[in-house]
Image: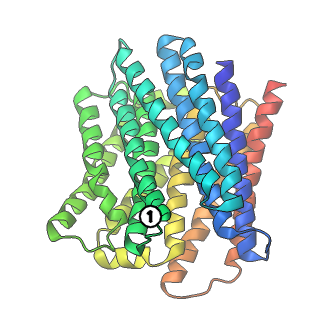
Amino acid sequence: MQLLQRYTRIALLNLLFVALIGVILRYKIAFSLPFIDQKHLLRGHSHFAFAGWVTHAIMLLLVNYLAAQKGDQMISRYKWVINANLVTAYGMLISFPVQGYGVCSILFSTLSIFVSYVFAVMYWKDLNSLAEKSIGHWWMKAALLFNALSSAGAFSLALMMATKNLHQDWYLASVYFFLHFQYNGWFFFACMGLATAKFLPGVKLSTQKKIFWLFASACIPAYVLSALWLPIPGWAYVIVILAAFSQATGWVLVVRQIKIQAPFIRSITGKSAALLITLSCIALSIKLLLQLGSTVPALSTVAFGFRPIVIGYLHLILLGVISLFLLGFMITEKLILVENVVALSAVKAFSGAVILNELLLMIQGIAAMTYTAVPLIDSLLLMAAIALLAGIFLFNLSQQKTTK
């Protein structure tokens, strides 16, 4: 357990680095910072956010689940894989800002993918060895599969870079393929697996299976929701619409079960974790509604035509849905301790900053659709980024104070 708490502190430190780079990126947009290459730093920011923060956090929480079932020896078994992922994450953090897509950055990103393959094989076998089976295991296995599938997008990008055969549509299709199966596959299904096993064990098995299949059957066709600007046949468009409704239906069933299980969930989470997870659920509801809206061709064309809307949507998922859930679940598992005023302030500050950031991005996105300039929006977004940095800094500080 001490090793997992150490890895949790590393996760919080990594999130602090992600937030710090976010501040630098926002500062460069609002003001001048000529010695920094915006695109290179942005790539380092996104790759490290995926590998150093989210993937690292998911790995340690999945291992924590195994340790609860089979003992702390499982932590030692996965130590080298988690360390390998961290090495690749820091490699990308350093190499991408320096050289963009170069030899070192491509090497570390490729190694990161192979580390994820190794983790998937190990974890799949260990899940199968558990005496007590759970529908949560279905979610976790699906997450591992979608993580592996997302790498096809990364490899196709690498191939286009190597051959210098960059076609705009194929380039964007590859980027969105990777992002979709990371955000909506690996990240989401892993979180749902953890949540199902922890919060919904009392739900009927038939209901749990129905919820899983509503989401699992929709994940692959839902990729097309990220590529509706491509010419697709009518029959494929119908499947995409069905996928969007399938996800929404699955989420309605989840919310109903959460309401039924609410007393039990509150008893094991506490106020701080409950706040973070509730906000995560609200963000997920908004995200699924936006996906439903994107099935309207006119709205989809408008949305993907404006960068602020895409940025706002991606941050809604990464910060609003995933990061808030991971922090809330870490608190539930006692990996993050909220036993002092600083920790409680961190929960409120970070939650408020996420809400502020999303509101400003929403305003910027809506204004962009009407080609309206929002006064001081870049400065306001910089302030929101600083607020996010302050919130996660308090999280890091609170764990040091708790240890002492």
Left/right placement of residue 247 relative to residue 259 reads left
Q: What amino acid is found at the position of numbered circle 1 in the picture?
A: Met
Label 1: which residue?
A: 160
Q: Residue at x 44, y 53 (%)?
A: 155
Residue 257 seen anywhere in this rendered image of the structure:
yes
Q: Indicate whether 359 appears above or below 183.
A: below
- Which quadrant of the structure image shows residue 289? bottom left
Residue 56 drawn at (x, y percent)? 58, 37
Query: What quarter of the picture does the N terminus occupy?
Result: top right
Q: Position of residue 39 (x, y in %)?
A: 64, 68
Q: Find the residue positioned furthest to the front.
A: 163
Whether 170 is drawn above or below 347: the answer is below
In this image, 308 relative to 348: left or right?
A: left
For this orientation, the residue located farthest to the right is: 404
**Which residue is most to the left?**
235
Residue visible at 35% across and 41% down in the picture: 254
Q: Residue at x 38, y 65 (%)?
A: 173
Asked which secondary structure carries label 1, the reply is: helix
Q: Neighbour class for label 1 at 10 Å: few (<14), some, many (≥20)?
A: some
Residue 396: x %, y % from top left: 76, 39
- Identify whether 381 is placed above or below 13: below
State the residue in front, 152 or 300. 152
